[in-house]
Image: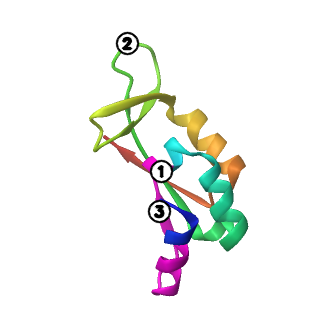
Amino acid sequence: RTAEDVDRLLRAGADKVGVNTAAISRPELIREIAERFGRQVLVLSVDARRRTDGTPGYEVTTHGGRTGTGLDAVAWAERAAELGAGEILLNSM
């Protein structure tokens, strides 16, 4: 949930660290991690489902797909890449 958490995981032997809800709540976390450890460390996990309101596209969700965020999945992935996400893992919910 923080850059310090990422530091602890990397020191414990992880090569990459995935973030999801924490980045939705605080997108600047992506930039903080990328600048401090390199973008190759950061994997953004995106949980997405088809929009339930009938409009085309996919919505980012949290809590195992139960809670919609209102964020468009493609727009969120693009923004995350701009902020420094090195990889994006897309999960269909």
Element class at badge 1: helix
For image coordinates 36% across by 13% down, the residue present is 53
Name the residue tied to disc 1.
Answer: 22
Give above or below for 85 relative to 38.
Answer: above
Q: Mark 1 is on which residue type? A: Ala
Element class at badge 2: loop
Q: Residues within 10 Å of mark 2 (few under 14, many from 20)?
A: few
C-alpha gap between disc 1 and disc 2: 28 Å
C-alpha gap between disc 1 and disc 3: 10 Å
Q: Nearer the viewer, residue 45 or 54?
A: 45
For image coordinates 50% across by 30% down, the residue present is 71
Q: Are marks 1 and 3 in contact (CB under 8 Å)?
A: no
Name the residue tied to disc 3.
Answer: 18
User: Which residues fall within the magenta stretch?
Assistant: 6-22
For image coordinates 52% across by 80% down, the residue present is 10
Give above or below for 58 relative to 14.
Answer: above
For image coordinates 56% across by 35% down, the residue present is 74
Residue 89 lies, in percent from the top left, at: 47, 55
Residue 66 lies, in percent from the top left, at: 27, 35
Q: Quadrant of the C terminus?
A: top left
Q: Are marks 1 and 2 in contact (CB under 8 Å)?
A: no
